Image (cartoon, rainbow, N blue to C red):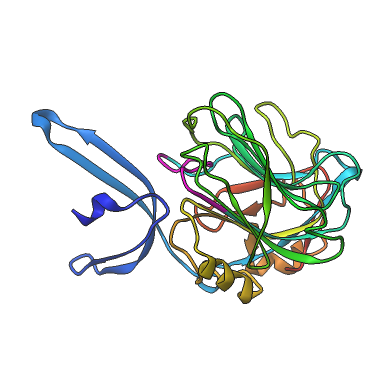
Amino acid sequence: MAFLNLDCGKLIRVKEEHAEIDGYYFIQAIKIAILLGGLIMCTWFLKEHVVYASSGLTPLALEFGGGHDDTAAVCFDALQPGECGAVPSLITMSAWVYVEDIPLVHTATIMTLGESNWLRLSVDLLGKIRLDGNIHATSPGLWTTGAGAVAADTWYFITVTYDPSSVANDPIVYIDGDVVAISETTAPVGTQLSRREEPIVIGNLKDVTVVTTRPFGGKIKGVRVYHRILSATEITTLYNAGVMDESLVTDGLIFEAPMVKTSELTAYTNLALTADTRVVDNIYCAIGIPRGTVTGRAP
């Protein structure tokens, strides 16, 4: 019965002596069917949990052209199957970012979760961290930090946690492991919208038809999405690690990118990415397709 309390993204241990199975697995999807006679059949779809060294994957940083190329992005269009939507009910999103070009007019998008019902994390022209949430039925929400929260030519570890189940809930923004004050510019109105499988886009905003003109100018690495709220202690753990460490804070992790094969890291470093040189997500092996001016950089 303990299985019934497990959600997508959970890391579990499976041990079965007859089949000689003993390992750790991520739950990818859950399927429930009612059979004849009222029997309920539950099926869990699992993906083996492996570390970078054994999976042959290693992190890569991405550099985006910013205002020089409005279409620059890496799009993970085919993501979590079944119950694992791109905008979960409880959300933590984090990334290491290095801003080279503070936007002069529009916001610079770090990542977007979803394309019809979406959350977007970005930097605006005043150096504010900004979260836009179009996931409520009547009108979206908007929250920002104070001006100068980030400056050009510096690496920052940005984390946002958010529970959108109530419009009274505000997100919490962390910079380098510390909570920073935010202002609610626009309060969301309405019930939380239902979600389906939708893309995650790094470096730009994507609507239902096209990658639009909110590009990021600089480097992004270590993008993670969780379907739960990380604690301040967990966020500090990730920040103090300084680099992506796949063994740290894995509970509820549903997305981790960009990654490449370890054997190809040298080839991808300083390479202008194309549709033939793609990156992957470490959790579901989703493929990230580069668009516009995106260059691989050493992490």
Say whether residue 34 is left or right of residue 89: left
Residue farthest toward the left in the current orientation of the protein? 37
Residue 64 place in picture, x, y as percent: 81, 51
Image position, residue 286 (x, y; %): 56, 48
- Quadrant location, the C terminus: bottom right
Q: Which residues are magenta?
A: 82-92
Task: Give the residue displayed 31% in from the left and 48% down from the top.
Answer: 44
Q: Residue furthest top?
A: 138
Q: Can you tell which quarter of the image residue 100 is in?
A: bottom right
Asked if residue 39 lies in the magenta stretch, the reply is no
Judge whether 25 appears above or below 134 on screen.
below
Q: Nearer the viewer, residue 98 or 277?
A: 98
Please determine whether, in this image, residue 248 is positioned above or below residue 44. below
- Viewer-proximal residue, 120 or 208? 120
- Position of 50 relative to 122 (above/below): below
Q: Residue at x 43, y 64 (%)?
A: 49
Total marks drawn? 0
Residue 56 percent coordinates (x, y): 56, 68
Q: Main secondary structure of the magenta part?
A: loop
Residue depicted at x 52% and y 40%: 168
Foreground: 206 or 109? 109
Q: Is 74 placed left or right of 26 in the picture?
A: right
How far across and how far down the image is residue 77, in percent?
60, 39
Q: Is residue 286 above or below residue 137?
A: below
